[in-house]
Amino acid sequence: MIIASPAKKEISIPLQPMTSVSSTTTNNNNNNNNTKINVEETAVDLVTVNGRNGQSDYIVQVFGQTSVFHSQVEETLSIKTTRTGFSEIRTLSCEAFIHNDTVFLSSPFVGQNAGLLNWADGEFQSCITHLIELAEEKTGCSALVVSIDRHNYKDTLSTMLRAFMYLGFEMIDPAIYGQETGYILVGYEL
């Protein structure tokens, strides 16, 4: 269970794009010929720091105007990750902010990326793993919290929650952070 700590810690975030390349080898069995195909998976991350507008940003949508985050957080992050190496190029976009050694992230799996049926085998897991690594390496925080908007996953909410839990996330009690009722928070200790 992730518990918010009362100590505030300054965190510096480098704003340079991060590119990671990993290679995987797959076997293709056509006509009893074993040929190896190298698939390179790359990710390019663009992190932009934005001043808060305070009216309808990510913090107000998820936690409301009376939350401690609304009064204490001055900047939000826009994260755009482009991933190649699977069946298609995926661009994930999400909003984030950092508070008390925890990265809060909106779910990037909306719109074209919504629903696990649209993903190739291993692609969802790879994207989540990359976001965990990004949060851990670039922010130095000890926890990652992903907010999931119930309205974006009307028929697939339970499948999405199981996928996050399979990767090591835990559901967070709403009393801990006081999110709006339309959101579910899942947490991961980095």
Image (spheres, rainbow, N blue to C red):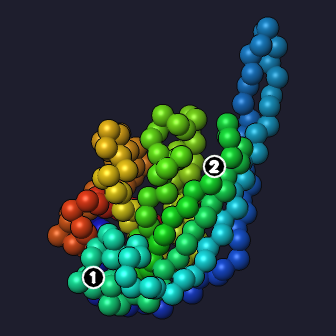
Which numbered dot is residue 90?
2
**Image check: 22 left or right of 186?**
right
Q: What residue type is labelled 2?
A: Arg
Q: In this orientation, which residue lies closer to the viewer: 31 or 78?
A: 78
In the image, residue 46 lies at what x, y percent? 66, 69
Pointer 1 or 2: first along the chain: 1
Which numbered dot is residue 25?
none
In the image, residue 43 lies at what x, y percent? 69, 57
Judge the density around disc 2: few (<14), some (14-19), many (≥20) Cα neighbours within 10 Å.
Answer: some
Q: How far apart are marks 1 and 2 (CA)?
A: 33 Å
Q: Which amino acid does label 1 sit on?
A: Gln
Q: In which quarter of the image is residue 143?
A: bottom left
Q: Mark 1 points at which residue?
A: 65
Residue in view at x 36 percent, y 57 percent: 148
Q: In which quarter of the image is residue 24?
A: top right
Instruction: Tell me whether circle 1 and circle 2 mark residues in contact (CB < 8 Å).
Output: no
- Say what secondary structure mark 2 lies in: strand
In the image, residue 7 lies at what x, y percent? 33, 90
Residue in view at x 56 percent, y 34 percent: 121
**Image check: 27 left or right of 6?**
right
